[in-house]
Image (cartoon, rainbow, N blue to C red):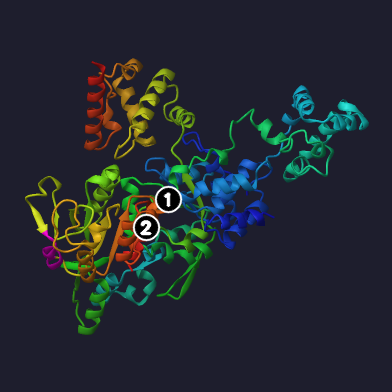
């Protein structure tokens, strides 16, 4: 019945399955959305969408599939202002067409038929657009009172509601391709959680106790350590210059990461990784850490996250002495390769929009260096990055 | 069976919420409710139970909760102790099976409402472990080799704060509703329900201040419905006149008793800073 709608949803990349579609049909069969498009909208939304980030996309598909399908409401349809129709007709009809109206019995007769049709309309709500919208088959469509169909349903609806529910698109800012607040980031980062038992044994291990008791013949209590999130993260943040517009989103990412990971080490760098990184941006000149020390201090099971826009001159990556701030004896890509040789799990988060990456040579190069593991700093990108890291 | 939910005298349900609730009641599938904290997710189950007059069984999930605990638990330690003391009960293993919340709901005389609160707090595997049980509304007790079948399929309401993503297979079996933050009109109805006969002017001023605070960019935690209700209660108790909420001369940019609305010292700082800037621009 709504198979077209279903496939449009799938085409818009909404994760709907046959099972959900059948649930919707079952619900329709149970009469849960009788004769009201709003109810049908709510019902289908509840059946087919399972995540608030998809609500906006659903609204758009719903709007385009059921455009103009809003049936005229009872009572309201009978009050179509005649002058309004007459005016539209006068403006859009050719002389020939006006003559044809006369042949059909004149304007009043036509209005009469229209009223009849509208009255018939009440019962079969999905037929609504057919005879008005598609033209061709009915006198009203053929004469084209309105190039887009007489749109009786929509226009009348304006009396009680300015925009249809799904046209309001209230869920726009829940779409996962837009930027994020701290809380969202935390949720995305949680994908990286990996629980492991370490530390002091404080919890009763019931299974182990029963097992040991059965073996020994007396009560033998066994304890295990509590479970902790054992993921360790090294965070490298690009600061200054072209990163200034993204300060806020980086701050949010940082504060979310801080509360999410117990083992989080962060360092700053400028544009590209060289022989020095620093922990405190204000004292970067005096208190820098040698990158070698970082590589030697943190074991290879740390996961590395770079945050930066990777927009710089290609020389900064390719040549010794290419850095804009100081003389570097070894090129940026050498340091990057060194780091990647130690830490196999690494991603680069880029706050710039994904579509622009290919326009910057250096971004392409950094991406290549990381083996394509560059992700946009959106909820969706973060999600993909965390998936990559937890592999 | 006409058990339609239309909101209650103490709960304002929007139309889309009613459709979702009624669909899940009629088709006997679980209803998954998400939304900002403080928009009445947990209360919803309570009110559904009250509206259609059935008992409510609450199962609050913690990070340590296991799916098995909802079905039943086998108290092996008690049995071991009894066996060492020579208690006669030890011969019947059924004595040591403790039914969980799900079992309780399955065994109820009337069709109950089962609330599974904050399902996202539990381990990632938790929802998967309940798939079959919630779908078929039956489970097998391994120790006694008995199958527990629901006498009446309970109305299951599940809330989530989005801390973890739920598995697709689980989502497919649920109806979903996202409680949006109420608009001004709905909010006025909600306040009316909670404080009948409250001064219209106070509500108007309070809502104005409230939405103004929500619109301040960069707040760590935006105040929600439950905080607004607390705040209004405070305003009533302290007998604050509506005019006090209105002082638009920027000197009192921070509304009285703001502690009920802002729960975070950074937010309060931000607020004071904004007030300071506004004052400076004024001069």
Q: Position of residue B60 (x, y in %)?
A: 36, 53
Camera-nearest residue between A201 and B275: B275
Residue A230 visible, this orientation: no
Q: Which of A312 and A237 lies nearest the eye of the viewer?
A: A312
Q: Position of residue B19 (x, y in %)?
A: 57, 44
Q: Provide the chain ID for the residue under circle 1.
A: A
| Mark 2 and mark 1 residues within 8 Å of each other at the beta carbon | yes
Q: Sequence-wise, which precedes: disc 2 or disc 1?
A: 1
The quadrant in which the N terminus of chain A is found is bottom right
Tell me if residue B192 comes above or below residue A296 in the rendering. above
Residue A292 lies in the magenta-colored region: yes
Is residue A287 rendered magenta in the image? Answer: no
Secondary structure beneath label 1? loop
Residue in view at x 49 percent, y 46 percent: B49
Left or right: where B271 falls relative to B29: left
**Residue located beneath label 1 in the image:** A176
Q: Which residue is mark 2?
A: A383
Q: Secondary structure at mark 2?
A: helix
Q: Residue at x 36, y 32 (%)?
A: B215
* x and y percentages locating residue B114 in the rendered image: 46, 53
Q: How many marks?
A: 2
State which chain disc 2 sits on: A
| Residue at 43% from the left image edge and 48% from the top image edge | B34
Q: How far is mark 2 from mark 1, CA to CA?
A: 10 Å
Boundaries of the magenta span: A290-297
> What is the crowding at mark 1: few (fewer than 14 residues within 10 Å), some, or many (at least 20)?
some
Specify whether disc 2 shares its chain with disc 1: yes
Look at the magenta stretch and give its main secondary structure: helix
Q: Residue at 46%, 34% (x, y): give it.
A: B10
Please provide percent x and percent y for residue B23.
Answer: 58, 50
């Amino acid at each position: 019945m709504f198979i077209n709608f279903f496939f449009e949803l799938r085409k818009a990349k909404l994760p709907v399955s046959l099972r959900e579609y059948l649930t919707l049909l079952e619900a329709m069969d149970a009469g849960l959305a009788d004769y009201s498009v709003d109810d049908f909208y709510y019902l289908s939304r509840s059946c087919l969408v399972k995540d608030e980030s998809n609500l906006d996309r659903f609204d758009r598909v719903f709007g385009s599939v059921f455009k103009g399908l809003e049936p005229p409401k009872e009572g309201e349809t009978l009050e179509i202002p005649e002058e309004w129709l007459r005016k539209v007709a006068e403006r859009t009809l050719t002389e020939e067409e006006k003559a044809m109206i006369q042949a059909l019995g004149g304007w009043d007769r036509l209005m009469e038929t229209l009223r009849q049709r509208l009255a018939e309309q009440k019962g079969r709500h999905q037929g609504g657009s057919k005879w008005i919208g598609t033209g061709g088959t009915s006198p009203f469509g053929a004469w084209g009172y309105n190039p887009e169909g007489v749109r009786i349903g929509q226009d009348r609806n304006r009396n009680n509601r300015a925009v249809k529910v799904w046209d309001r698109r209230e869920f726009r800012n829940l779409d996962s391709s837009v930027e994020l607040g701290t809380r969202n980031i935390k949720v995305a980062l949680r994908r990286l959680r990996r629980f492991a038992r370490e530390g002091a044994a404080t919890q009763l291990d019931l299974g182990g106790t029963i097992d040991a008791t059965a073996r020994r013949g007396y009560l033998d209590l066994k304890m295990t350590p509590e479970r902790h999130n054992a993921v360790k993260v090294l965070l490298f943040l690009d600061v200054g210059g072209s990163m200034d517009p993204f300060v806020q989103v980086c701050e949010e990412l940082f504060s979310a990461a801080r509360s999410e990971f117990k083992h989080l080490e962060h360092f700053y760098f400028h544009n590209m990784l060289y022989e020095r990184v620093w922990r405190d941006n204000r004292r970067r000149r005096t208190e820098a850490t040698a990158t070698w020390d970082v590589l030697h201090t943190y074991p290879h099971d740390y996961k590395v996250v770079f945050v930066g826009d990777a927009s710089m001159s290609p020389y900064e990556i390719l040549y010794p002495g290419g850095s804009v701030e100081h003389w570097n004896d070894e090129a940026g890509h050498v340091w990057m390769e060194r780091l990647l040789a130690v830490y196999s799990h690494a991603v680069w988060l880029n706050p710039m929009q994904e579509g622009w990456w290919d326009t910057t040579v250096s971004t392409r190069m950094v991406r290549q260096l990381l083996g394509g593991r560059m992700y946009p700093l959106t909820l969706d990108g973060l999600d993909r990055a965390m998936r990559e890291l937890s592999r | 069976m006409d058990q339609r939910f239309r909101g209650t005298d103490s709960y304002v349900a929007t139309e889309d919420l009613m459709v979702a609730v009624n669909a899940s009641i009629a088709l006997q599938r679980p209803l998954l409710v998400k939304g900002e904290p403080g928009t009445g997710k947990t209360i919803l189950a309570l009110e559904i139970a009250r509206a259609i007059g059935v008992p409510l069984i609450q199962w609050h999930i913690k990070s340590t909760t296991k799916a098995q605990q909802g079905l039943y638990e086998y108290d092996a330690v008690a049995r071991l102790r009894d066996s060492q003391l020579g208690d006669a009960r030890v011969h019947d293993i059924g004595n040591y099976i403790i039914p969980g919340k799900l079992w309780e709901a399955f065994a109820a005389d009337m069709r109950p409402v089962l609330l599974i609160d904050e399902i996202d707090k539990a381990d990632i595997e938790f929802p998967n472990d309940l798939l079959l049980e919630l779908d078929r509304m039956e489970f097998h007790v391994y120790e006694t080799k008995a199958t527990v079948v629901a006498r009446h399929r309970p109305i299951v309401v599940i809330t989530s704060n989005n801390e973890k993503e739920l598995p697709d297979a689980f989502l497919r079996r649920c109806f979903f509703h996202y409680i949006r933050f109420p608009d001004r009109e709905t909010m006025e109805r909600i306040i009316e329900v909670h404080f009948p006969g409250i001064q219209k002017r106070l509500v108007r001023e309070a809502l104005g201040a409230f939405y103004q605070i929500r619109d301040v960019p960069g707040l760590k935690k935006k105040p929600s419905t439950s905080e607004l209700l607390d705040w209004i209660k405070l305003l009533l108790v302290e007998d604050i006149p509506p005019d006090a909420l209105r002082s638009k001369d920027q000197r009192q940019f921070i509304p009285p008793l703001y502690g009920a609305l802002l729960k975070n010292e950074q937010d309060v700082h931000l607020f004071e800073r904004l007030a300071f800037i506004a004052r400076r621009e004024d001069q």
